Amino acid sequence: MSLKTQAKVLRALQDGEIEPVGAGRPMRVDVRVIAATNKSLREEIAAGRFREDLFYRLSVLPIHLPPLRERRDDIPLLVDHLVALICKENNFRPRRMTPAAMEALAARPWPGNVRELRNYLERVLILGPAGEIDAADLPRVAATDAPAADALFDAPSLREFKERAEKAYLQRKLEEHEWNITRTAQAVGTPRSNLYKKLEQYALTRGGEGETG
């Protein structure tokens, strides 16, 4: 949120009042607020991008949700649940992962967390065999990571390195947020207009189909 919007949210939390668009007068509300962020608000406060008074107003019962790579014990449970859900949604026959497949899935870092895991499992269920799915049936998810890193460090200049790194970073973030421009812009801390400029600058598109707003 912009600092202007943060001020409005703070007033609403403090006074219990909001002013609907076009209403011309405030109205009382009785709500509970659940706020989420993927950033360090302490760092955002230090950088002047987040109001400290709003932080303390929101931080009544903080809950830290670690990334999937830090809770690998949850992955088998999530896999079982997601596989059953995907099969039901797509009218697939019930499928199961072998212990070796489950071990391979639990060993992966999943930078996109549960969203990435679900998308990957859907691909596995579409392309994989009926019945049991073994480790050998799992497509590689990081096959291009090493070449991408090599390409970054092969840049002929610091400027070129920064541009390549920015392009790779934006590509990853867009994929994590399913190419939703608004959510991606918020996640990376840049205005939508600037993100659109970067899309044009780096010719970033969603599988060659263009981006979504």
Image: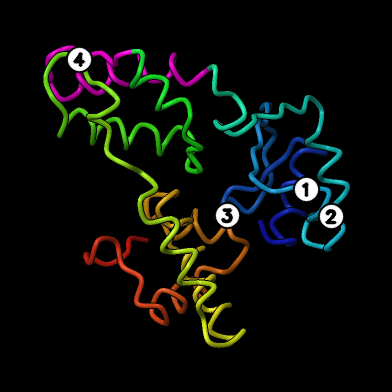
Name the N-terminal-most of marks 2 and 3: 2
Disc 3 vs disc 4: which is toward the camera? 4
> Which amino acid is tagged 2?
Ile
CA separation in Å, label 2 and label 3: 16 Å
CA separation in Å, label 4 and label 1: 44 Å
User: Which residue corresponds to the image point at 43% horizontal and 57% vertical from the top-left?
Assistant: 174
User: In the image, is residue 96 above or below residue 105?
Assistant: above
Q: Which residues are magenta?
A: 74-98
Report whether 203 appears left or right of 184: left
Disc 4 vs disc 1: which is toward the camera? 4
Q: Which residue is mark 2?
A: 45
User: Which residue corresponds to the image point at 63% horizontal and 54% vertical from the top-left?
Assistant: 24
Kindly indicate the quadrant of the structure image that contains residue 103. Answer: top left
- Principal SS element in the magenta part? helix
User: Which residue corresponds to the image point at 53% horizontal and 84% vertical from the top-left?
Assistant: 160
User: In the image, is residue 78 above or below residue 122?
Assistant: above
Q: Tell me if label 1 and label 2 are in contact, CB under 8 Å.
A: yes
